[in-house]
Image: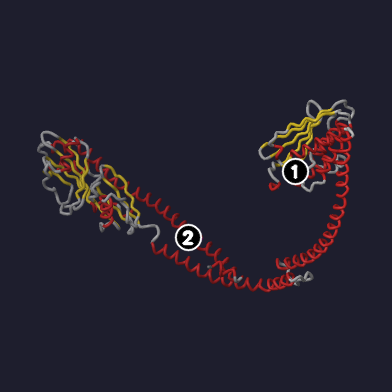
Amino acid sequence: MIKKLAKHSFKRELFWIFLSVTLFLVVMGGFLTIQGFQMRIKSDHERADEEQEKVIASKVLNMMELSEKTLRSISENNTIMMSLAGLELNPQTVYTALYEESSDVRSFAIVELYTEGDCLFSTGQSGVSGHLSEGYSILREATAKKGEPVYAVNSGVNGPYGPELLIAVRVIDVPTSGYALIRIPGDRIEEALKGSINSRDGFIFANRRLRPVCSTGSAADGRDLELIRRNLFSGKAYNEDSTDNIYISEAGHGLLCIYITPPAFEPSAVRTGYEIMVVMVVLSIILCLVAASFMSGLVAKPLNTLSAAMRHFRKGDFDTKIEINRDDEFGQLATGFNKMTSQLKTTINERVEAQKRLNTARIEMMQAQLNPHFLYNTLDTIKWVAKANQVPEVATLSSSLAGLLRTGISADQFILLKDELETVRNYCDIQRIRFDDSFDVDIKVPADLEQLFVPKLILQPMVENSIIHGFEGMSHGHIEIDAAQEGEILKISITDNGRGINDETVKALENDDPEALRGHLGFNNVNTIIRIYFGKEYGVRAERPEQGGTRISITLPVLHSRTDL
């Protein structure tokens, strides 16, 4: 519909062209710019997030490493070991040893010593925590691990310290069970990470069952953790349906560090980018309309002048001229139109004169054909008189010459190869009588190739050249004619045992030099006829075989009928 409307108005055509190009550049350029900018910012944002996540995770891991180091030190302290073994020691002495060994972790953790489930000593401000059954999960696991630290998450808020990370190790086995336990409250972890997390980011430290030790920043409300938990339990990707960037890393011992950051681009920012692009599209439409109007007015006047001149020209006024005083393409077009009308008028006059000359030439040709016809009929009469009076040579000469004339006066410019070979035979019959059988001709052309079409009279001049020039001074000459098809090319070879062609003629044929071939009428005419019909890749070539003589090669396209031309 748009194309149909545009055809009736040059102004509308310009408008649609300008609009199509401009909209393509604006829309595609704007879209690619927004998408590329988003990808670049998102990539940089993700890279910065990954680095920040490593910093946060390293702080948590450092707290865990210090806690394990403290547990190892406690396990090696004799005072603490004796106290847990049941020996009566001054509590102050034990507390002193415990405070010395826990100096690295007291800023963020509480260290407690248990024997048979009872808390004997604690660095917490509220004193000992009470009783823990040896069947309690972390103590039971510490018993099974035999001296290796074990981790557990106490996410209940009913305990004295709220959500916390528990790290325990079994210190002694006999005579009683002794344990060292470190409590890292969630609020202490949050306090340690304050400088690494801004108000828009969130961090969750939890176990594999997503029971949190701490949730800080934007994750403090628990909605992100609930979304992750719901996705994983439903078999989905953990960050599905989340607009934030979520990074989860392993902290070891079944613990996870979950770092949450907002998207690099807010939806409103992307929406603003597309709104700007829409405004640019509207402005482009207005500018295209103004430009189309200006361009239409700029070219309308010279186009109207050209259109009027062409109407006069179509009516037969070949003296029409266009006067446009411009140096641009319209001026060049007007100059070209004026030259065209002038040249066309000259050409028409010349063609009229040429047609007159052609008509005259045709009349002369028709008159000239009367002589070959008269000669042909006379020769035919001589042939029958020679046969009647038993003079076979005269009959052969007249019959062969009649065949040559029949081919020459034929209106067909292309004949079967079989008929062309018959023309060669007629010519050779005449020349054998003339030269007293001093040569023979051997034609080896397959029967299927004889049904192909070739230009007439292309072989006789080649054979004539062998007889007249090649066999001069020889007692007996031999000519062999063969043909072969190679794909869509027909190759005909005329080979003789004569004196051999000279180098100048071979070179002239290779270079297609008409001036050098001026003295070799047969070569020149045949080569020219073939190239006029079929092109320069076809024609006549000559060479001297090793055994002597001359080989003429004629290359033609394979023609199964005259309609293949």
Tell me if 366 is positioned left or right of 122 in this view: right
What is the x, y in percent for residue 12?
58, 70
Q: Nearer the viewer, residue 197 or 153?
A: 153
Q: Nearer the viewer, residue 562 or 347?
A: 562
Tell me, yes or no, if residue 496 can be seen here. no
Q: Residue at x 78, y 43 (%)?
A: 456
Q: Report, in whole angstroms, how far the alpha carbon at label 1 lies from the one at label 2.
A: 69 Å
Specify which label sits upstream in the sequence, 1 or 2: 2
**Residue underneath mark 2:** 31
Question: Bounds of the magenta span?
Answer: 29-34
* Image-quadrant location for residue 97: top left
- Number of residues whose C-alpha sits closer than 10 Å to that of mark 2, classed few (under 14), some (14–19) or many (20 or more): some
The vertical placement of 6 against 141, above or below, is below
What is the x, y in percent for residue 488?
67, 40
What is the x, y in percent for residue 95?
16, 43
The vertical placement of 168 against 33, above or below, is above
Q: Nearer the viewer, residue 328 or 449?
A: 449
**Residue underneath mark 1:** 415
Q: In the rendered structure, which amino acid carries the disc numbered 1? A: Ile
- Number of residues whose C-alpha sits closer than 10 Å to that of mark 1, classed few (under 14), some (14–19) or many (20 or more): some
